[in-house]
Amino acid sequence: GQQVMQIPQYQHVQEGEDFTTYCNSSTTLSNIQWYKQRPGGHPVFLIQLVKSGEVKKQKRLTFQFGEAKKNSSLHITATQTTDVGTYFCAGHQGGNQFYFGTGTSLTVIP
Amino acid sequence: NAGVMQNPRHLVRRRGQEARLRCSPMKGHSHVYWYRQLPEEGLKFMVYLQKENIIDESGMPKERFSAEFPKEGPSILRIQQVVRGDSAAYFCASSQGNSPLHFGNGTRLTVT
């Protein structure tokens, strides 16, 4: 069945360092979404990528969708303490089903 | 424009009791999803419903768990005869078509 894996599971960085999380699907996706969950909170939608090779930026966040539409990455430049949380990718493969990755928990050390 | 409403926020049940979790989707959304999250773990899909229909329940345990989304009123996730292992955060999300998911604040279930 559909599987979406994310690495790393945990990441600790010093404030100001960069951070990247990677998402890999076992099958080709129609689109991929990214969500952020703050500690004690609920997942909040960040962005959706649809096209092969697509790159989108939101301030210090850069999202990429692989050419084969099976992998994606989220890169944060110069992390801040407000970036703390768990980042999930969610693969969409037609229909209305979303397959969430295992998440990457980011800790930023001031 | 109210978001996804879940209640209760916290629910404590003793082993063997029933837990009922409610979710009202965003206005205009007809797709409801339930996810379960254990502490420091990911979101595990449970069930996907549209009004009066269960579309995909492949993530639901075969026993004790059921879900519905009636024509009128909220979606309900029901857990019968709860056990300690059911303790988790249960998130509801809604969408319309291929739009992104909007999550509720979740219900934290504790089984004592």
Image: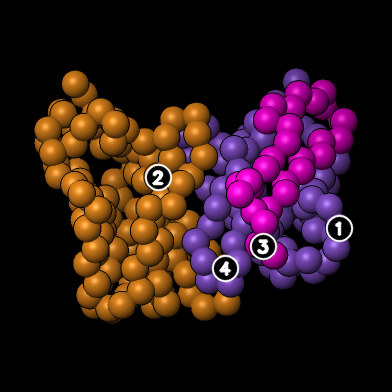
Chain colours: A orange, B purple
The residue located at (67%, 43%) in the rendering is B5
Q: Which mark's residue is nearer the viewer, 1 or 2?
A: 1
Q: Position of residue A17 (x, y in %)?
A: 12, 36
Q: Label 3 vs label 1: CA separation?
A: 13 Å
Q: Label 4 vs label 1: CA separation?
A: 23 Å
Q: Residue A36 carries which label?
A: 2
Q: Label 2 vs label 3: CA separation?
A: 24 Å
Residue position marked by numbered label 3 in the rendering: B28
Same subunit, labels 1 and 2: the answer reads: no
The span shown in magenta is B1-30
Q: Position of residue A74 (x, y in %)?
A: 26, 54
Q: Label 3 vs label 4: CA separation?
A: 19 Å
Magenta residue check for B103: no
Q: Label 4 vs label 2: CA separation?
A: 19 Å
Q: For the residue labelled by badge 2, is the local secondary structure a helix, a strand or a loop?
A: strand
Closer to the camera, B100 or A25? B100
Closer to the camera, B38 or B50? B50
Label 2 packing within 10 angstroms: few (<14), some (14-19), many (20+): many
Q: Residue B72 carries which label?
A: 1
Q: Label 1 vs label 2: CA separation?
A: 31 Å
Q: For the residue labelled by badge 3, is the local secondary structure a helix, a strand or a loop?
A: loop
The residue located at (43%, 40%) in the rendering is A37
Same subunit, labels 4 and 2: the answer reads: yes
Same subunit, labels 4 and 1: the answer reads: no
The chain ID associated with circle 1 is B
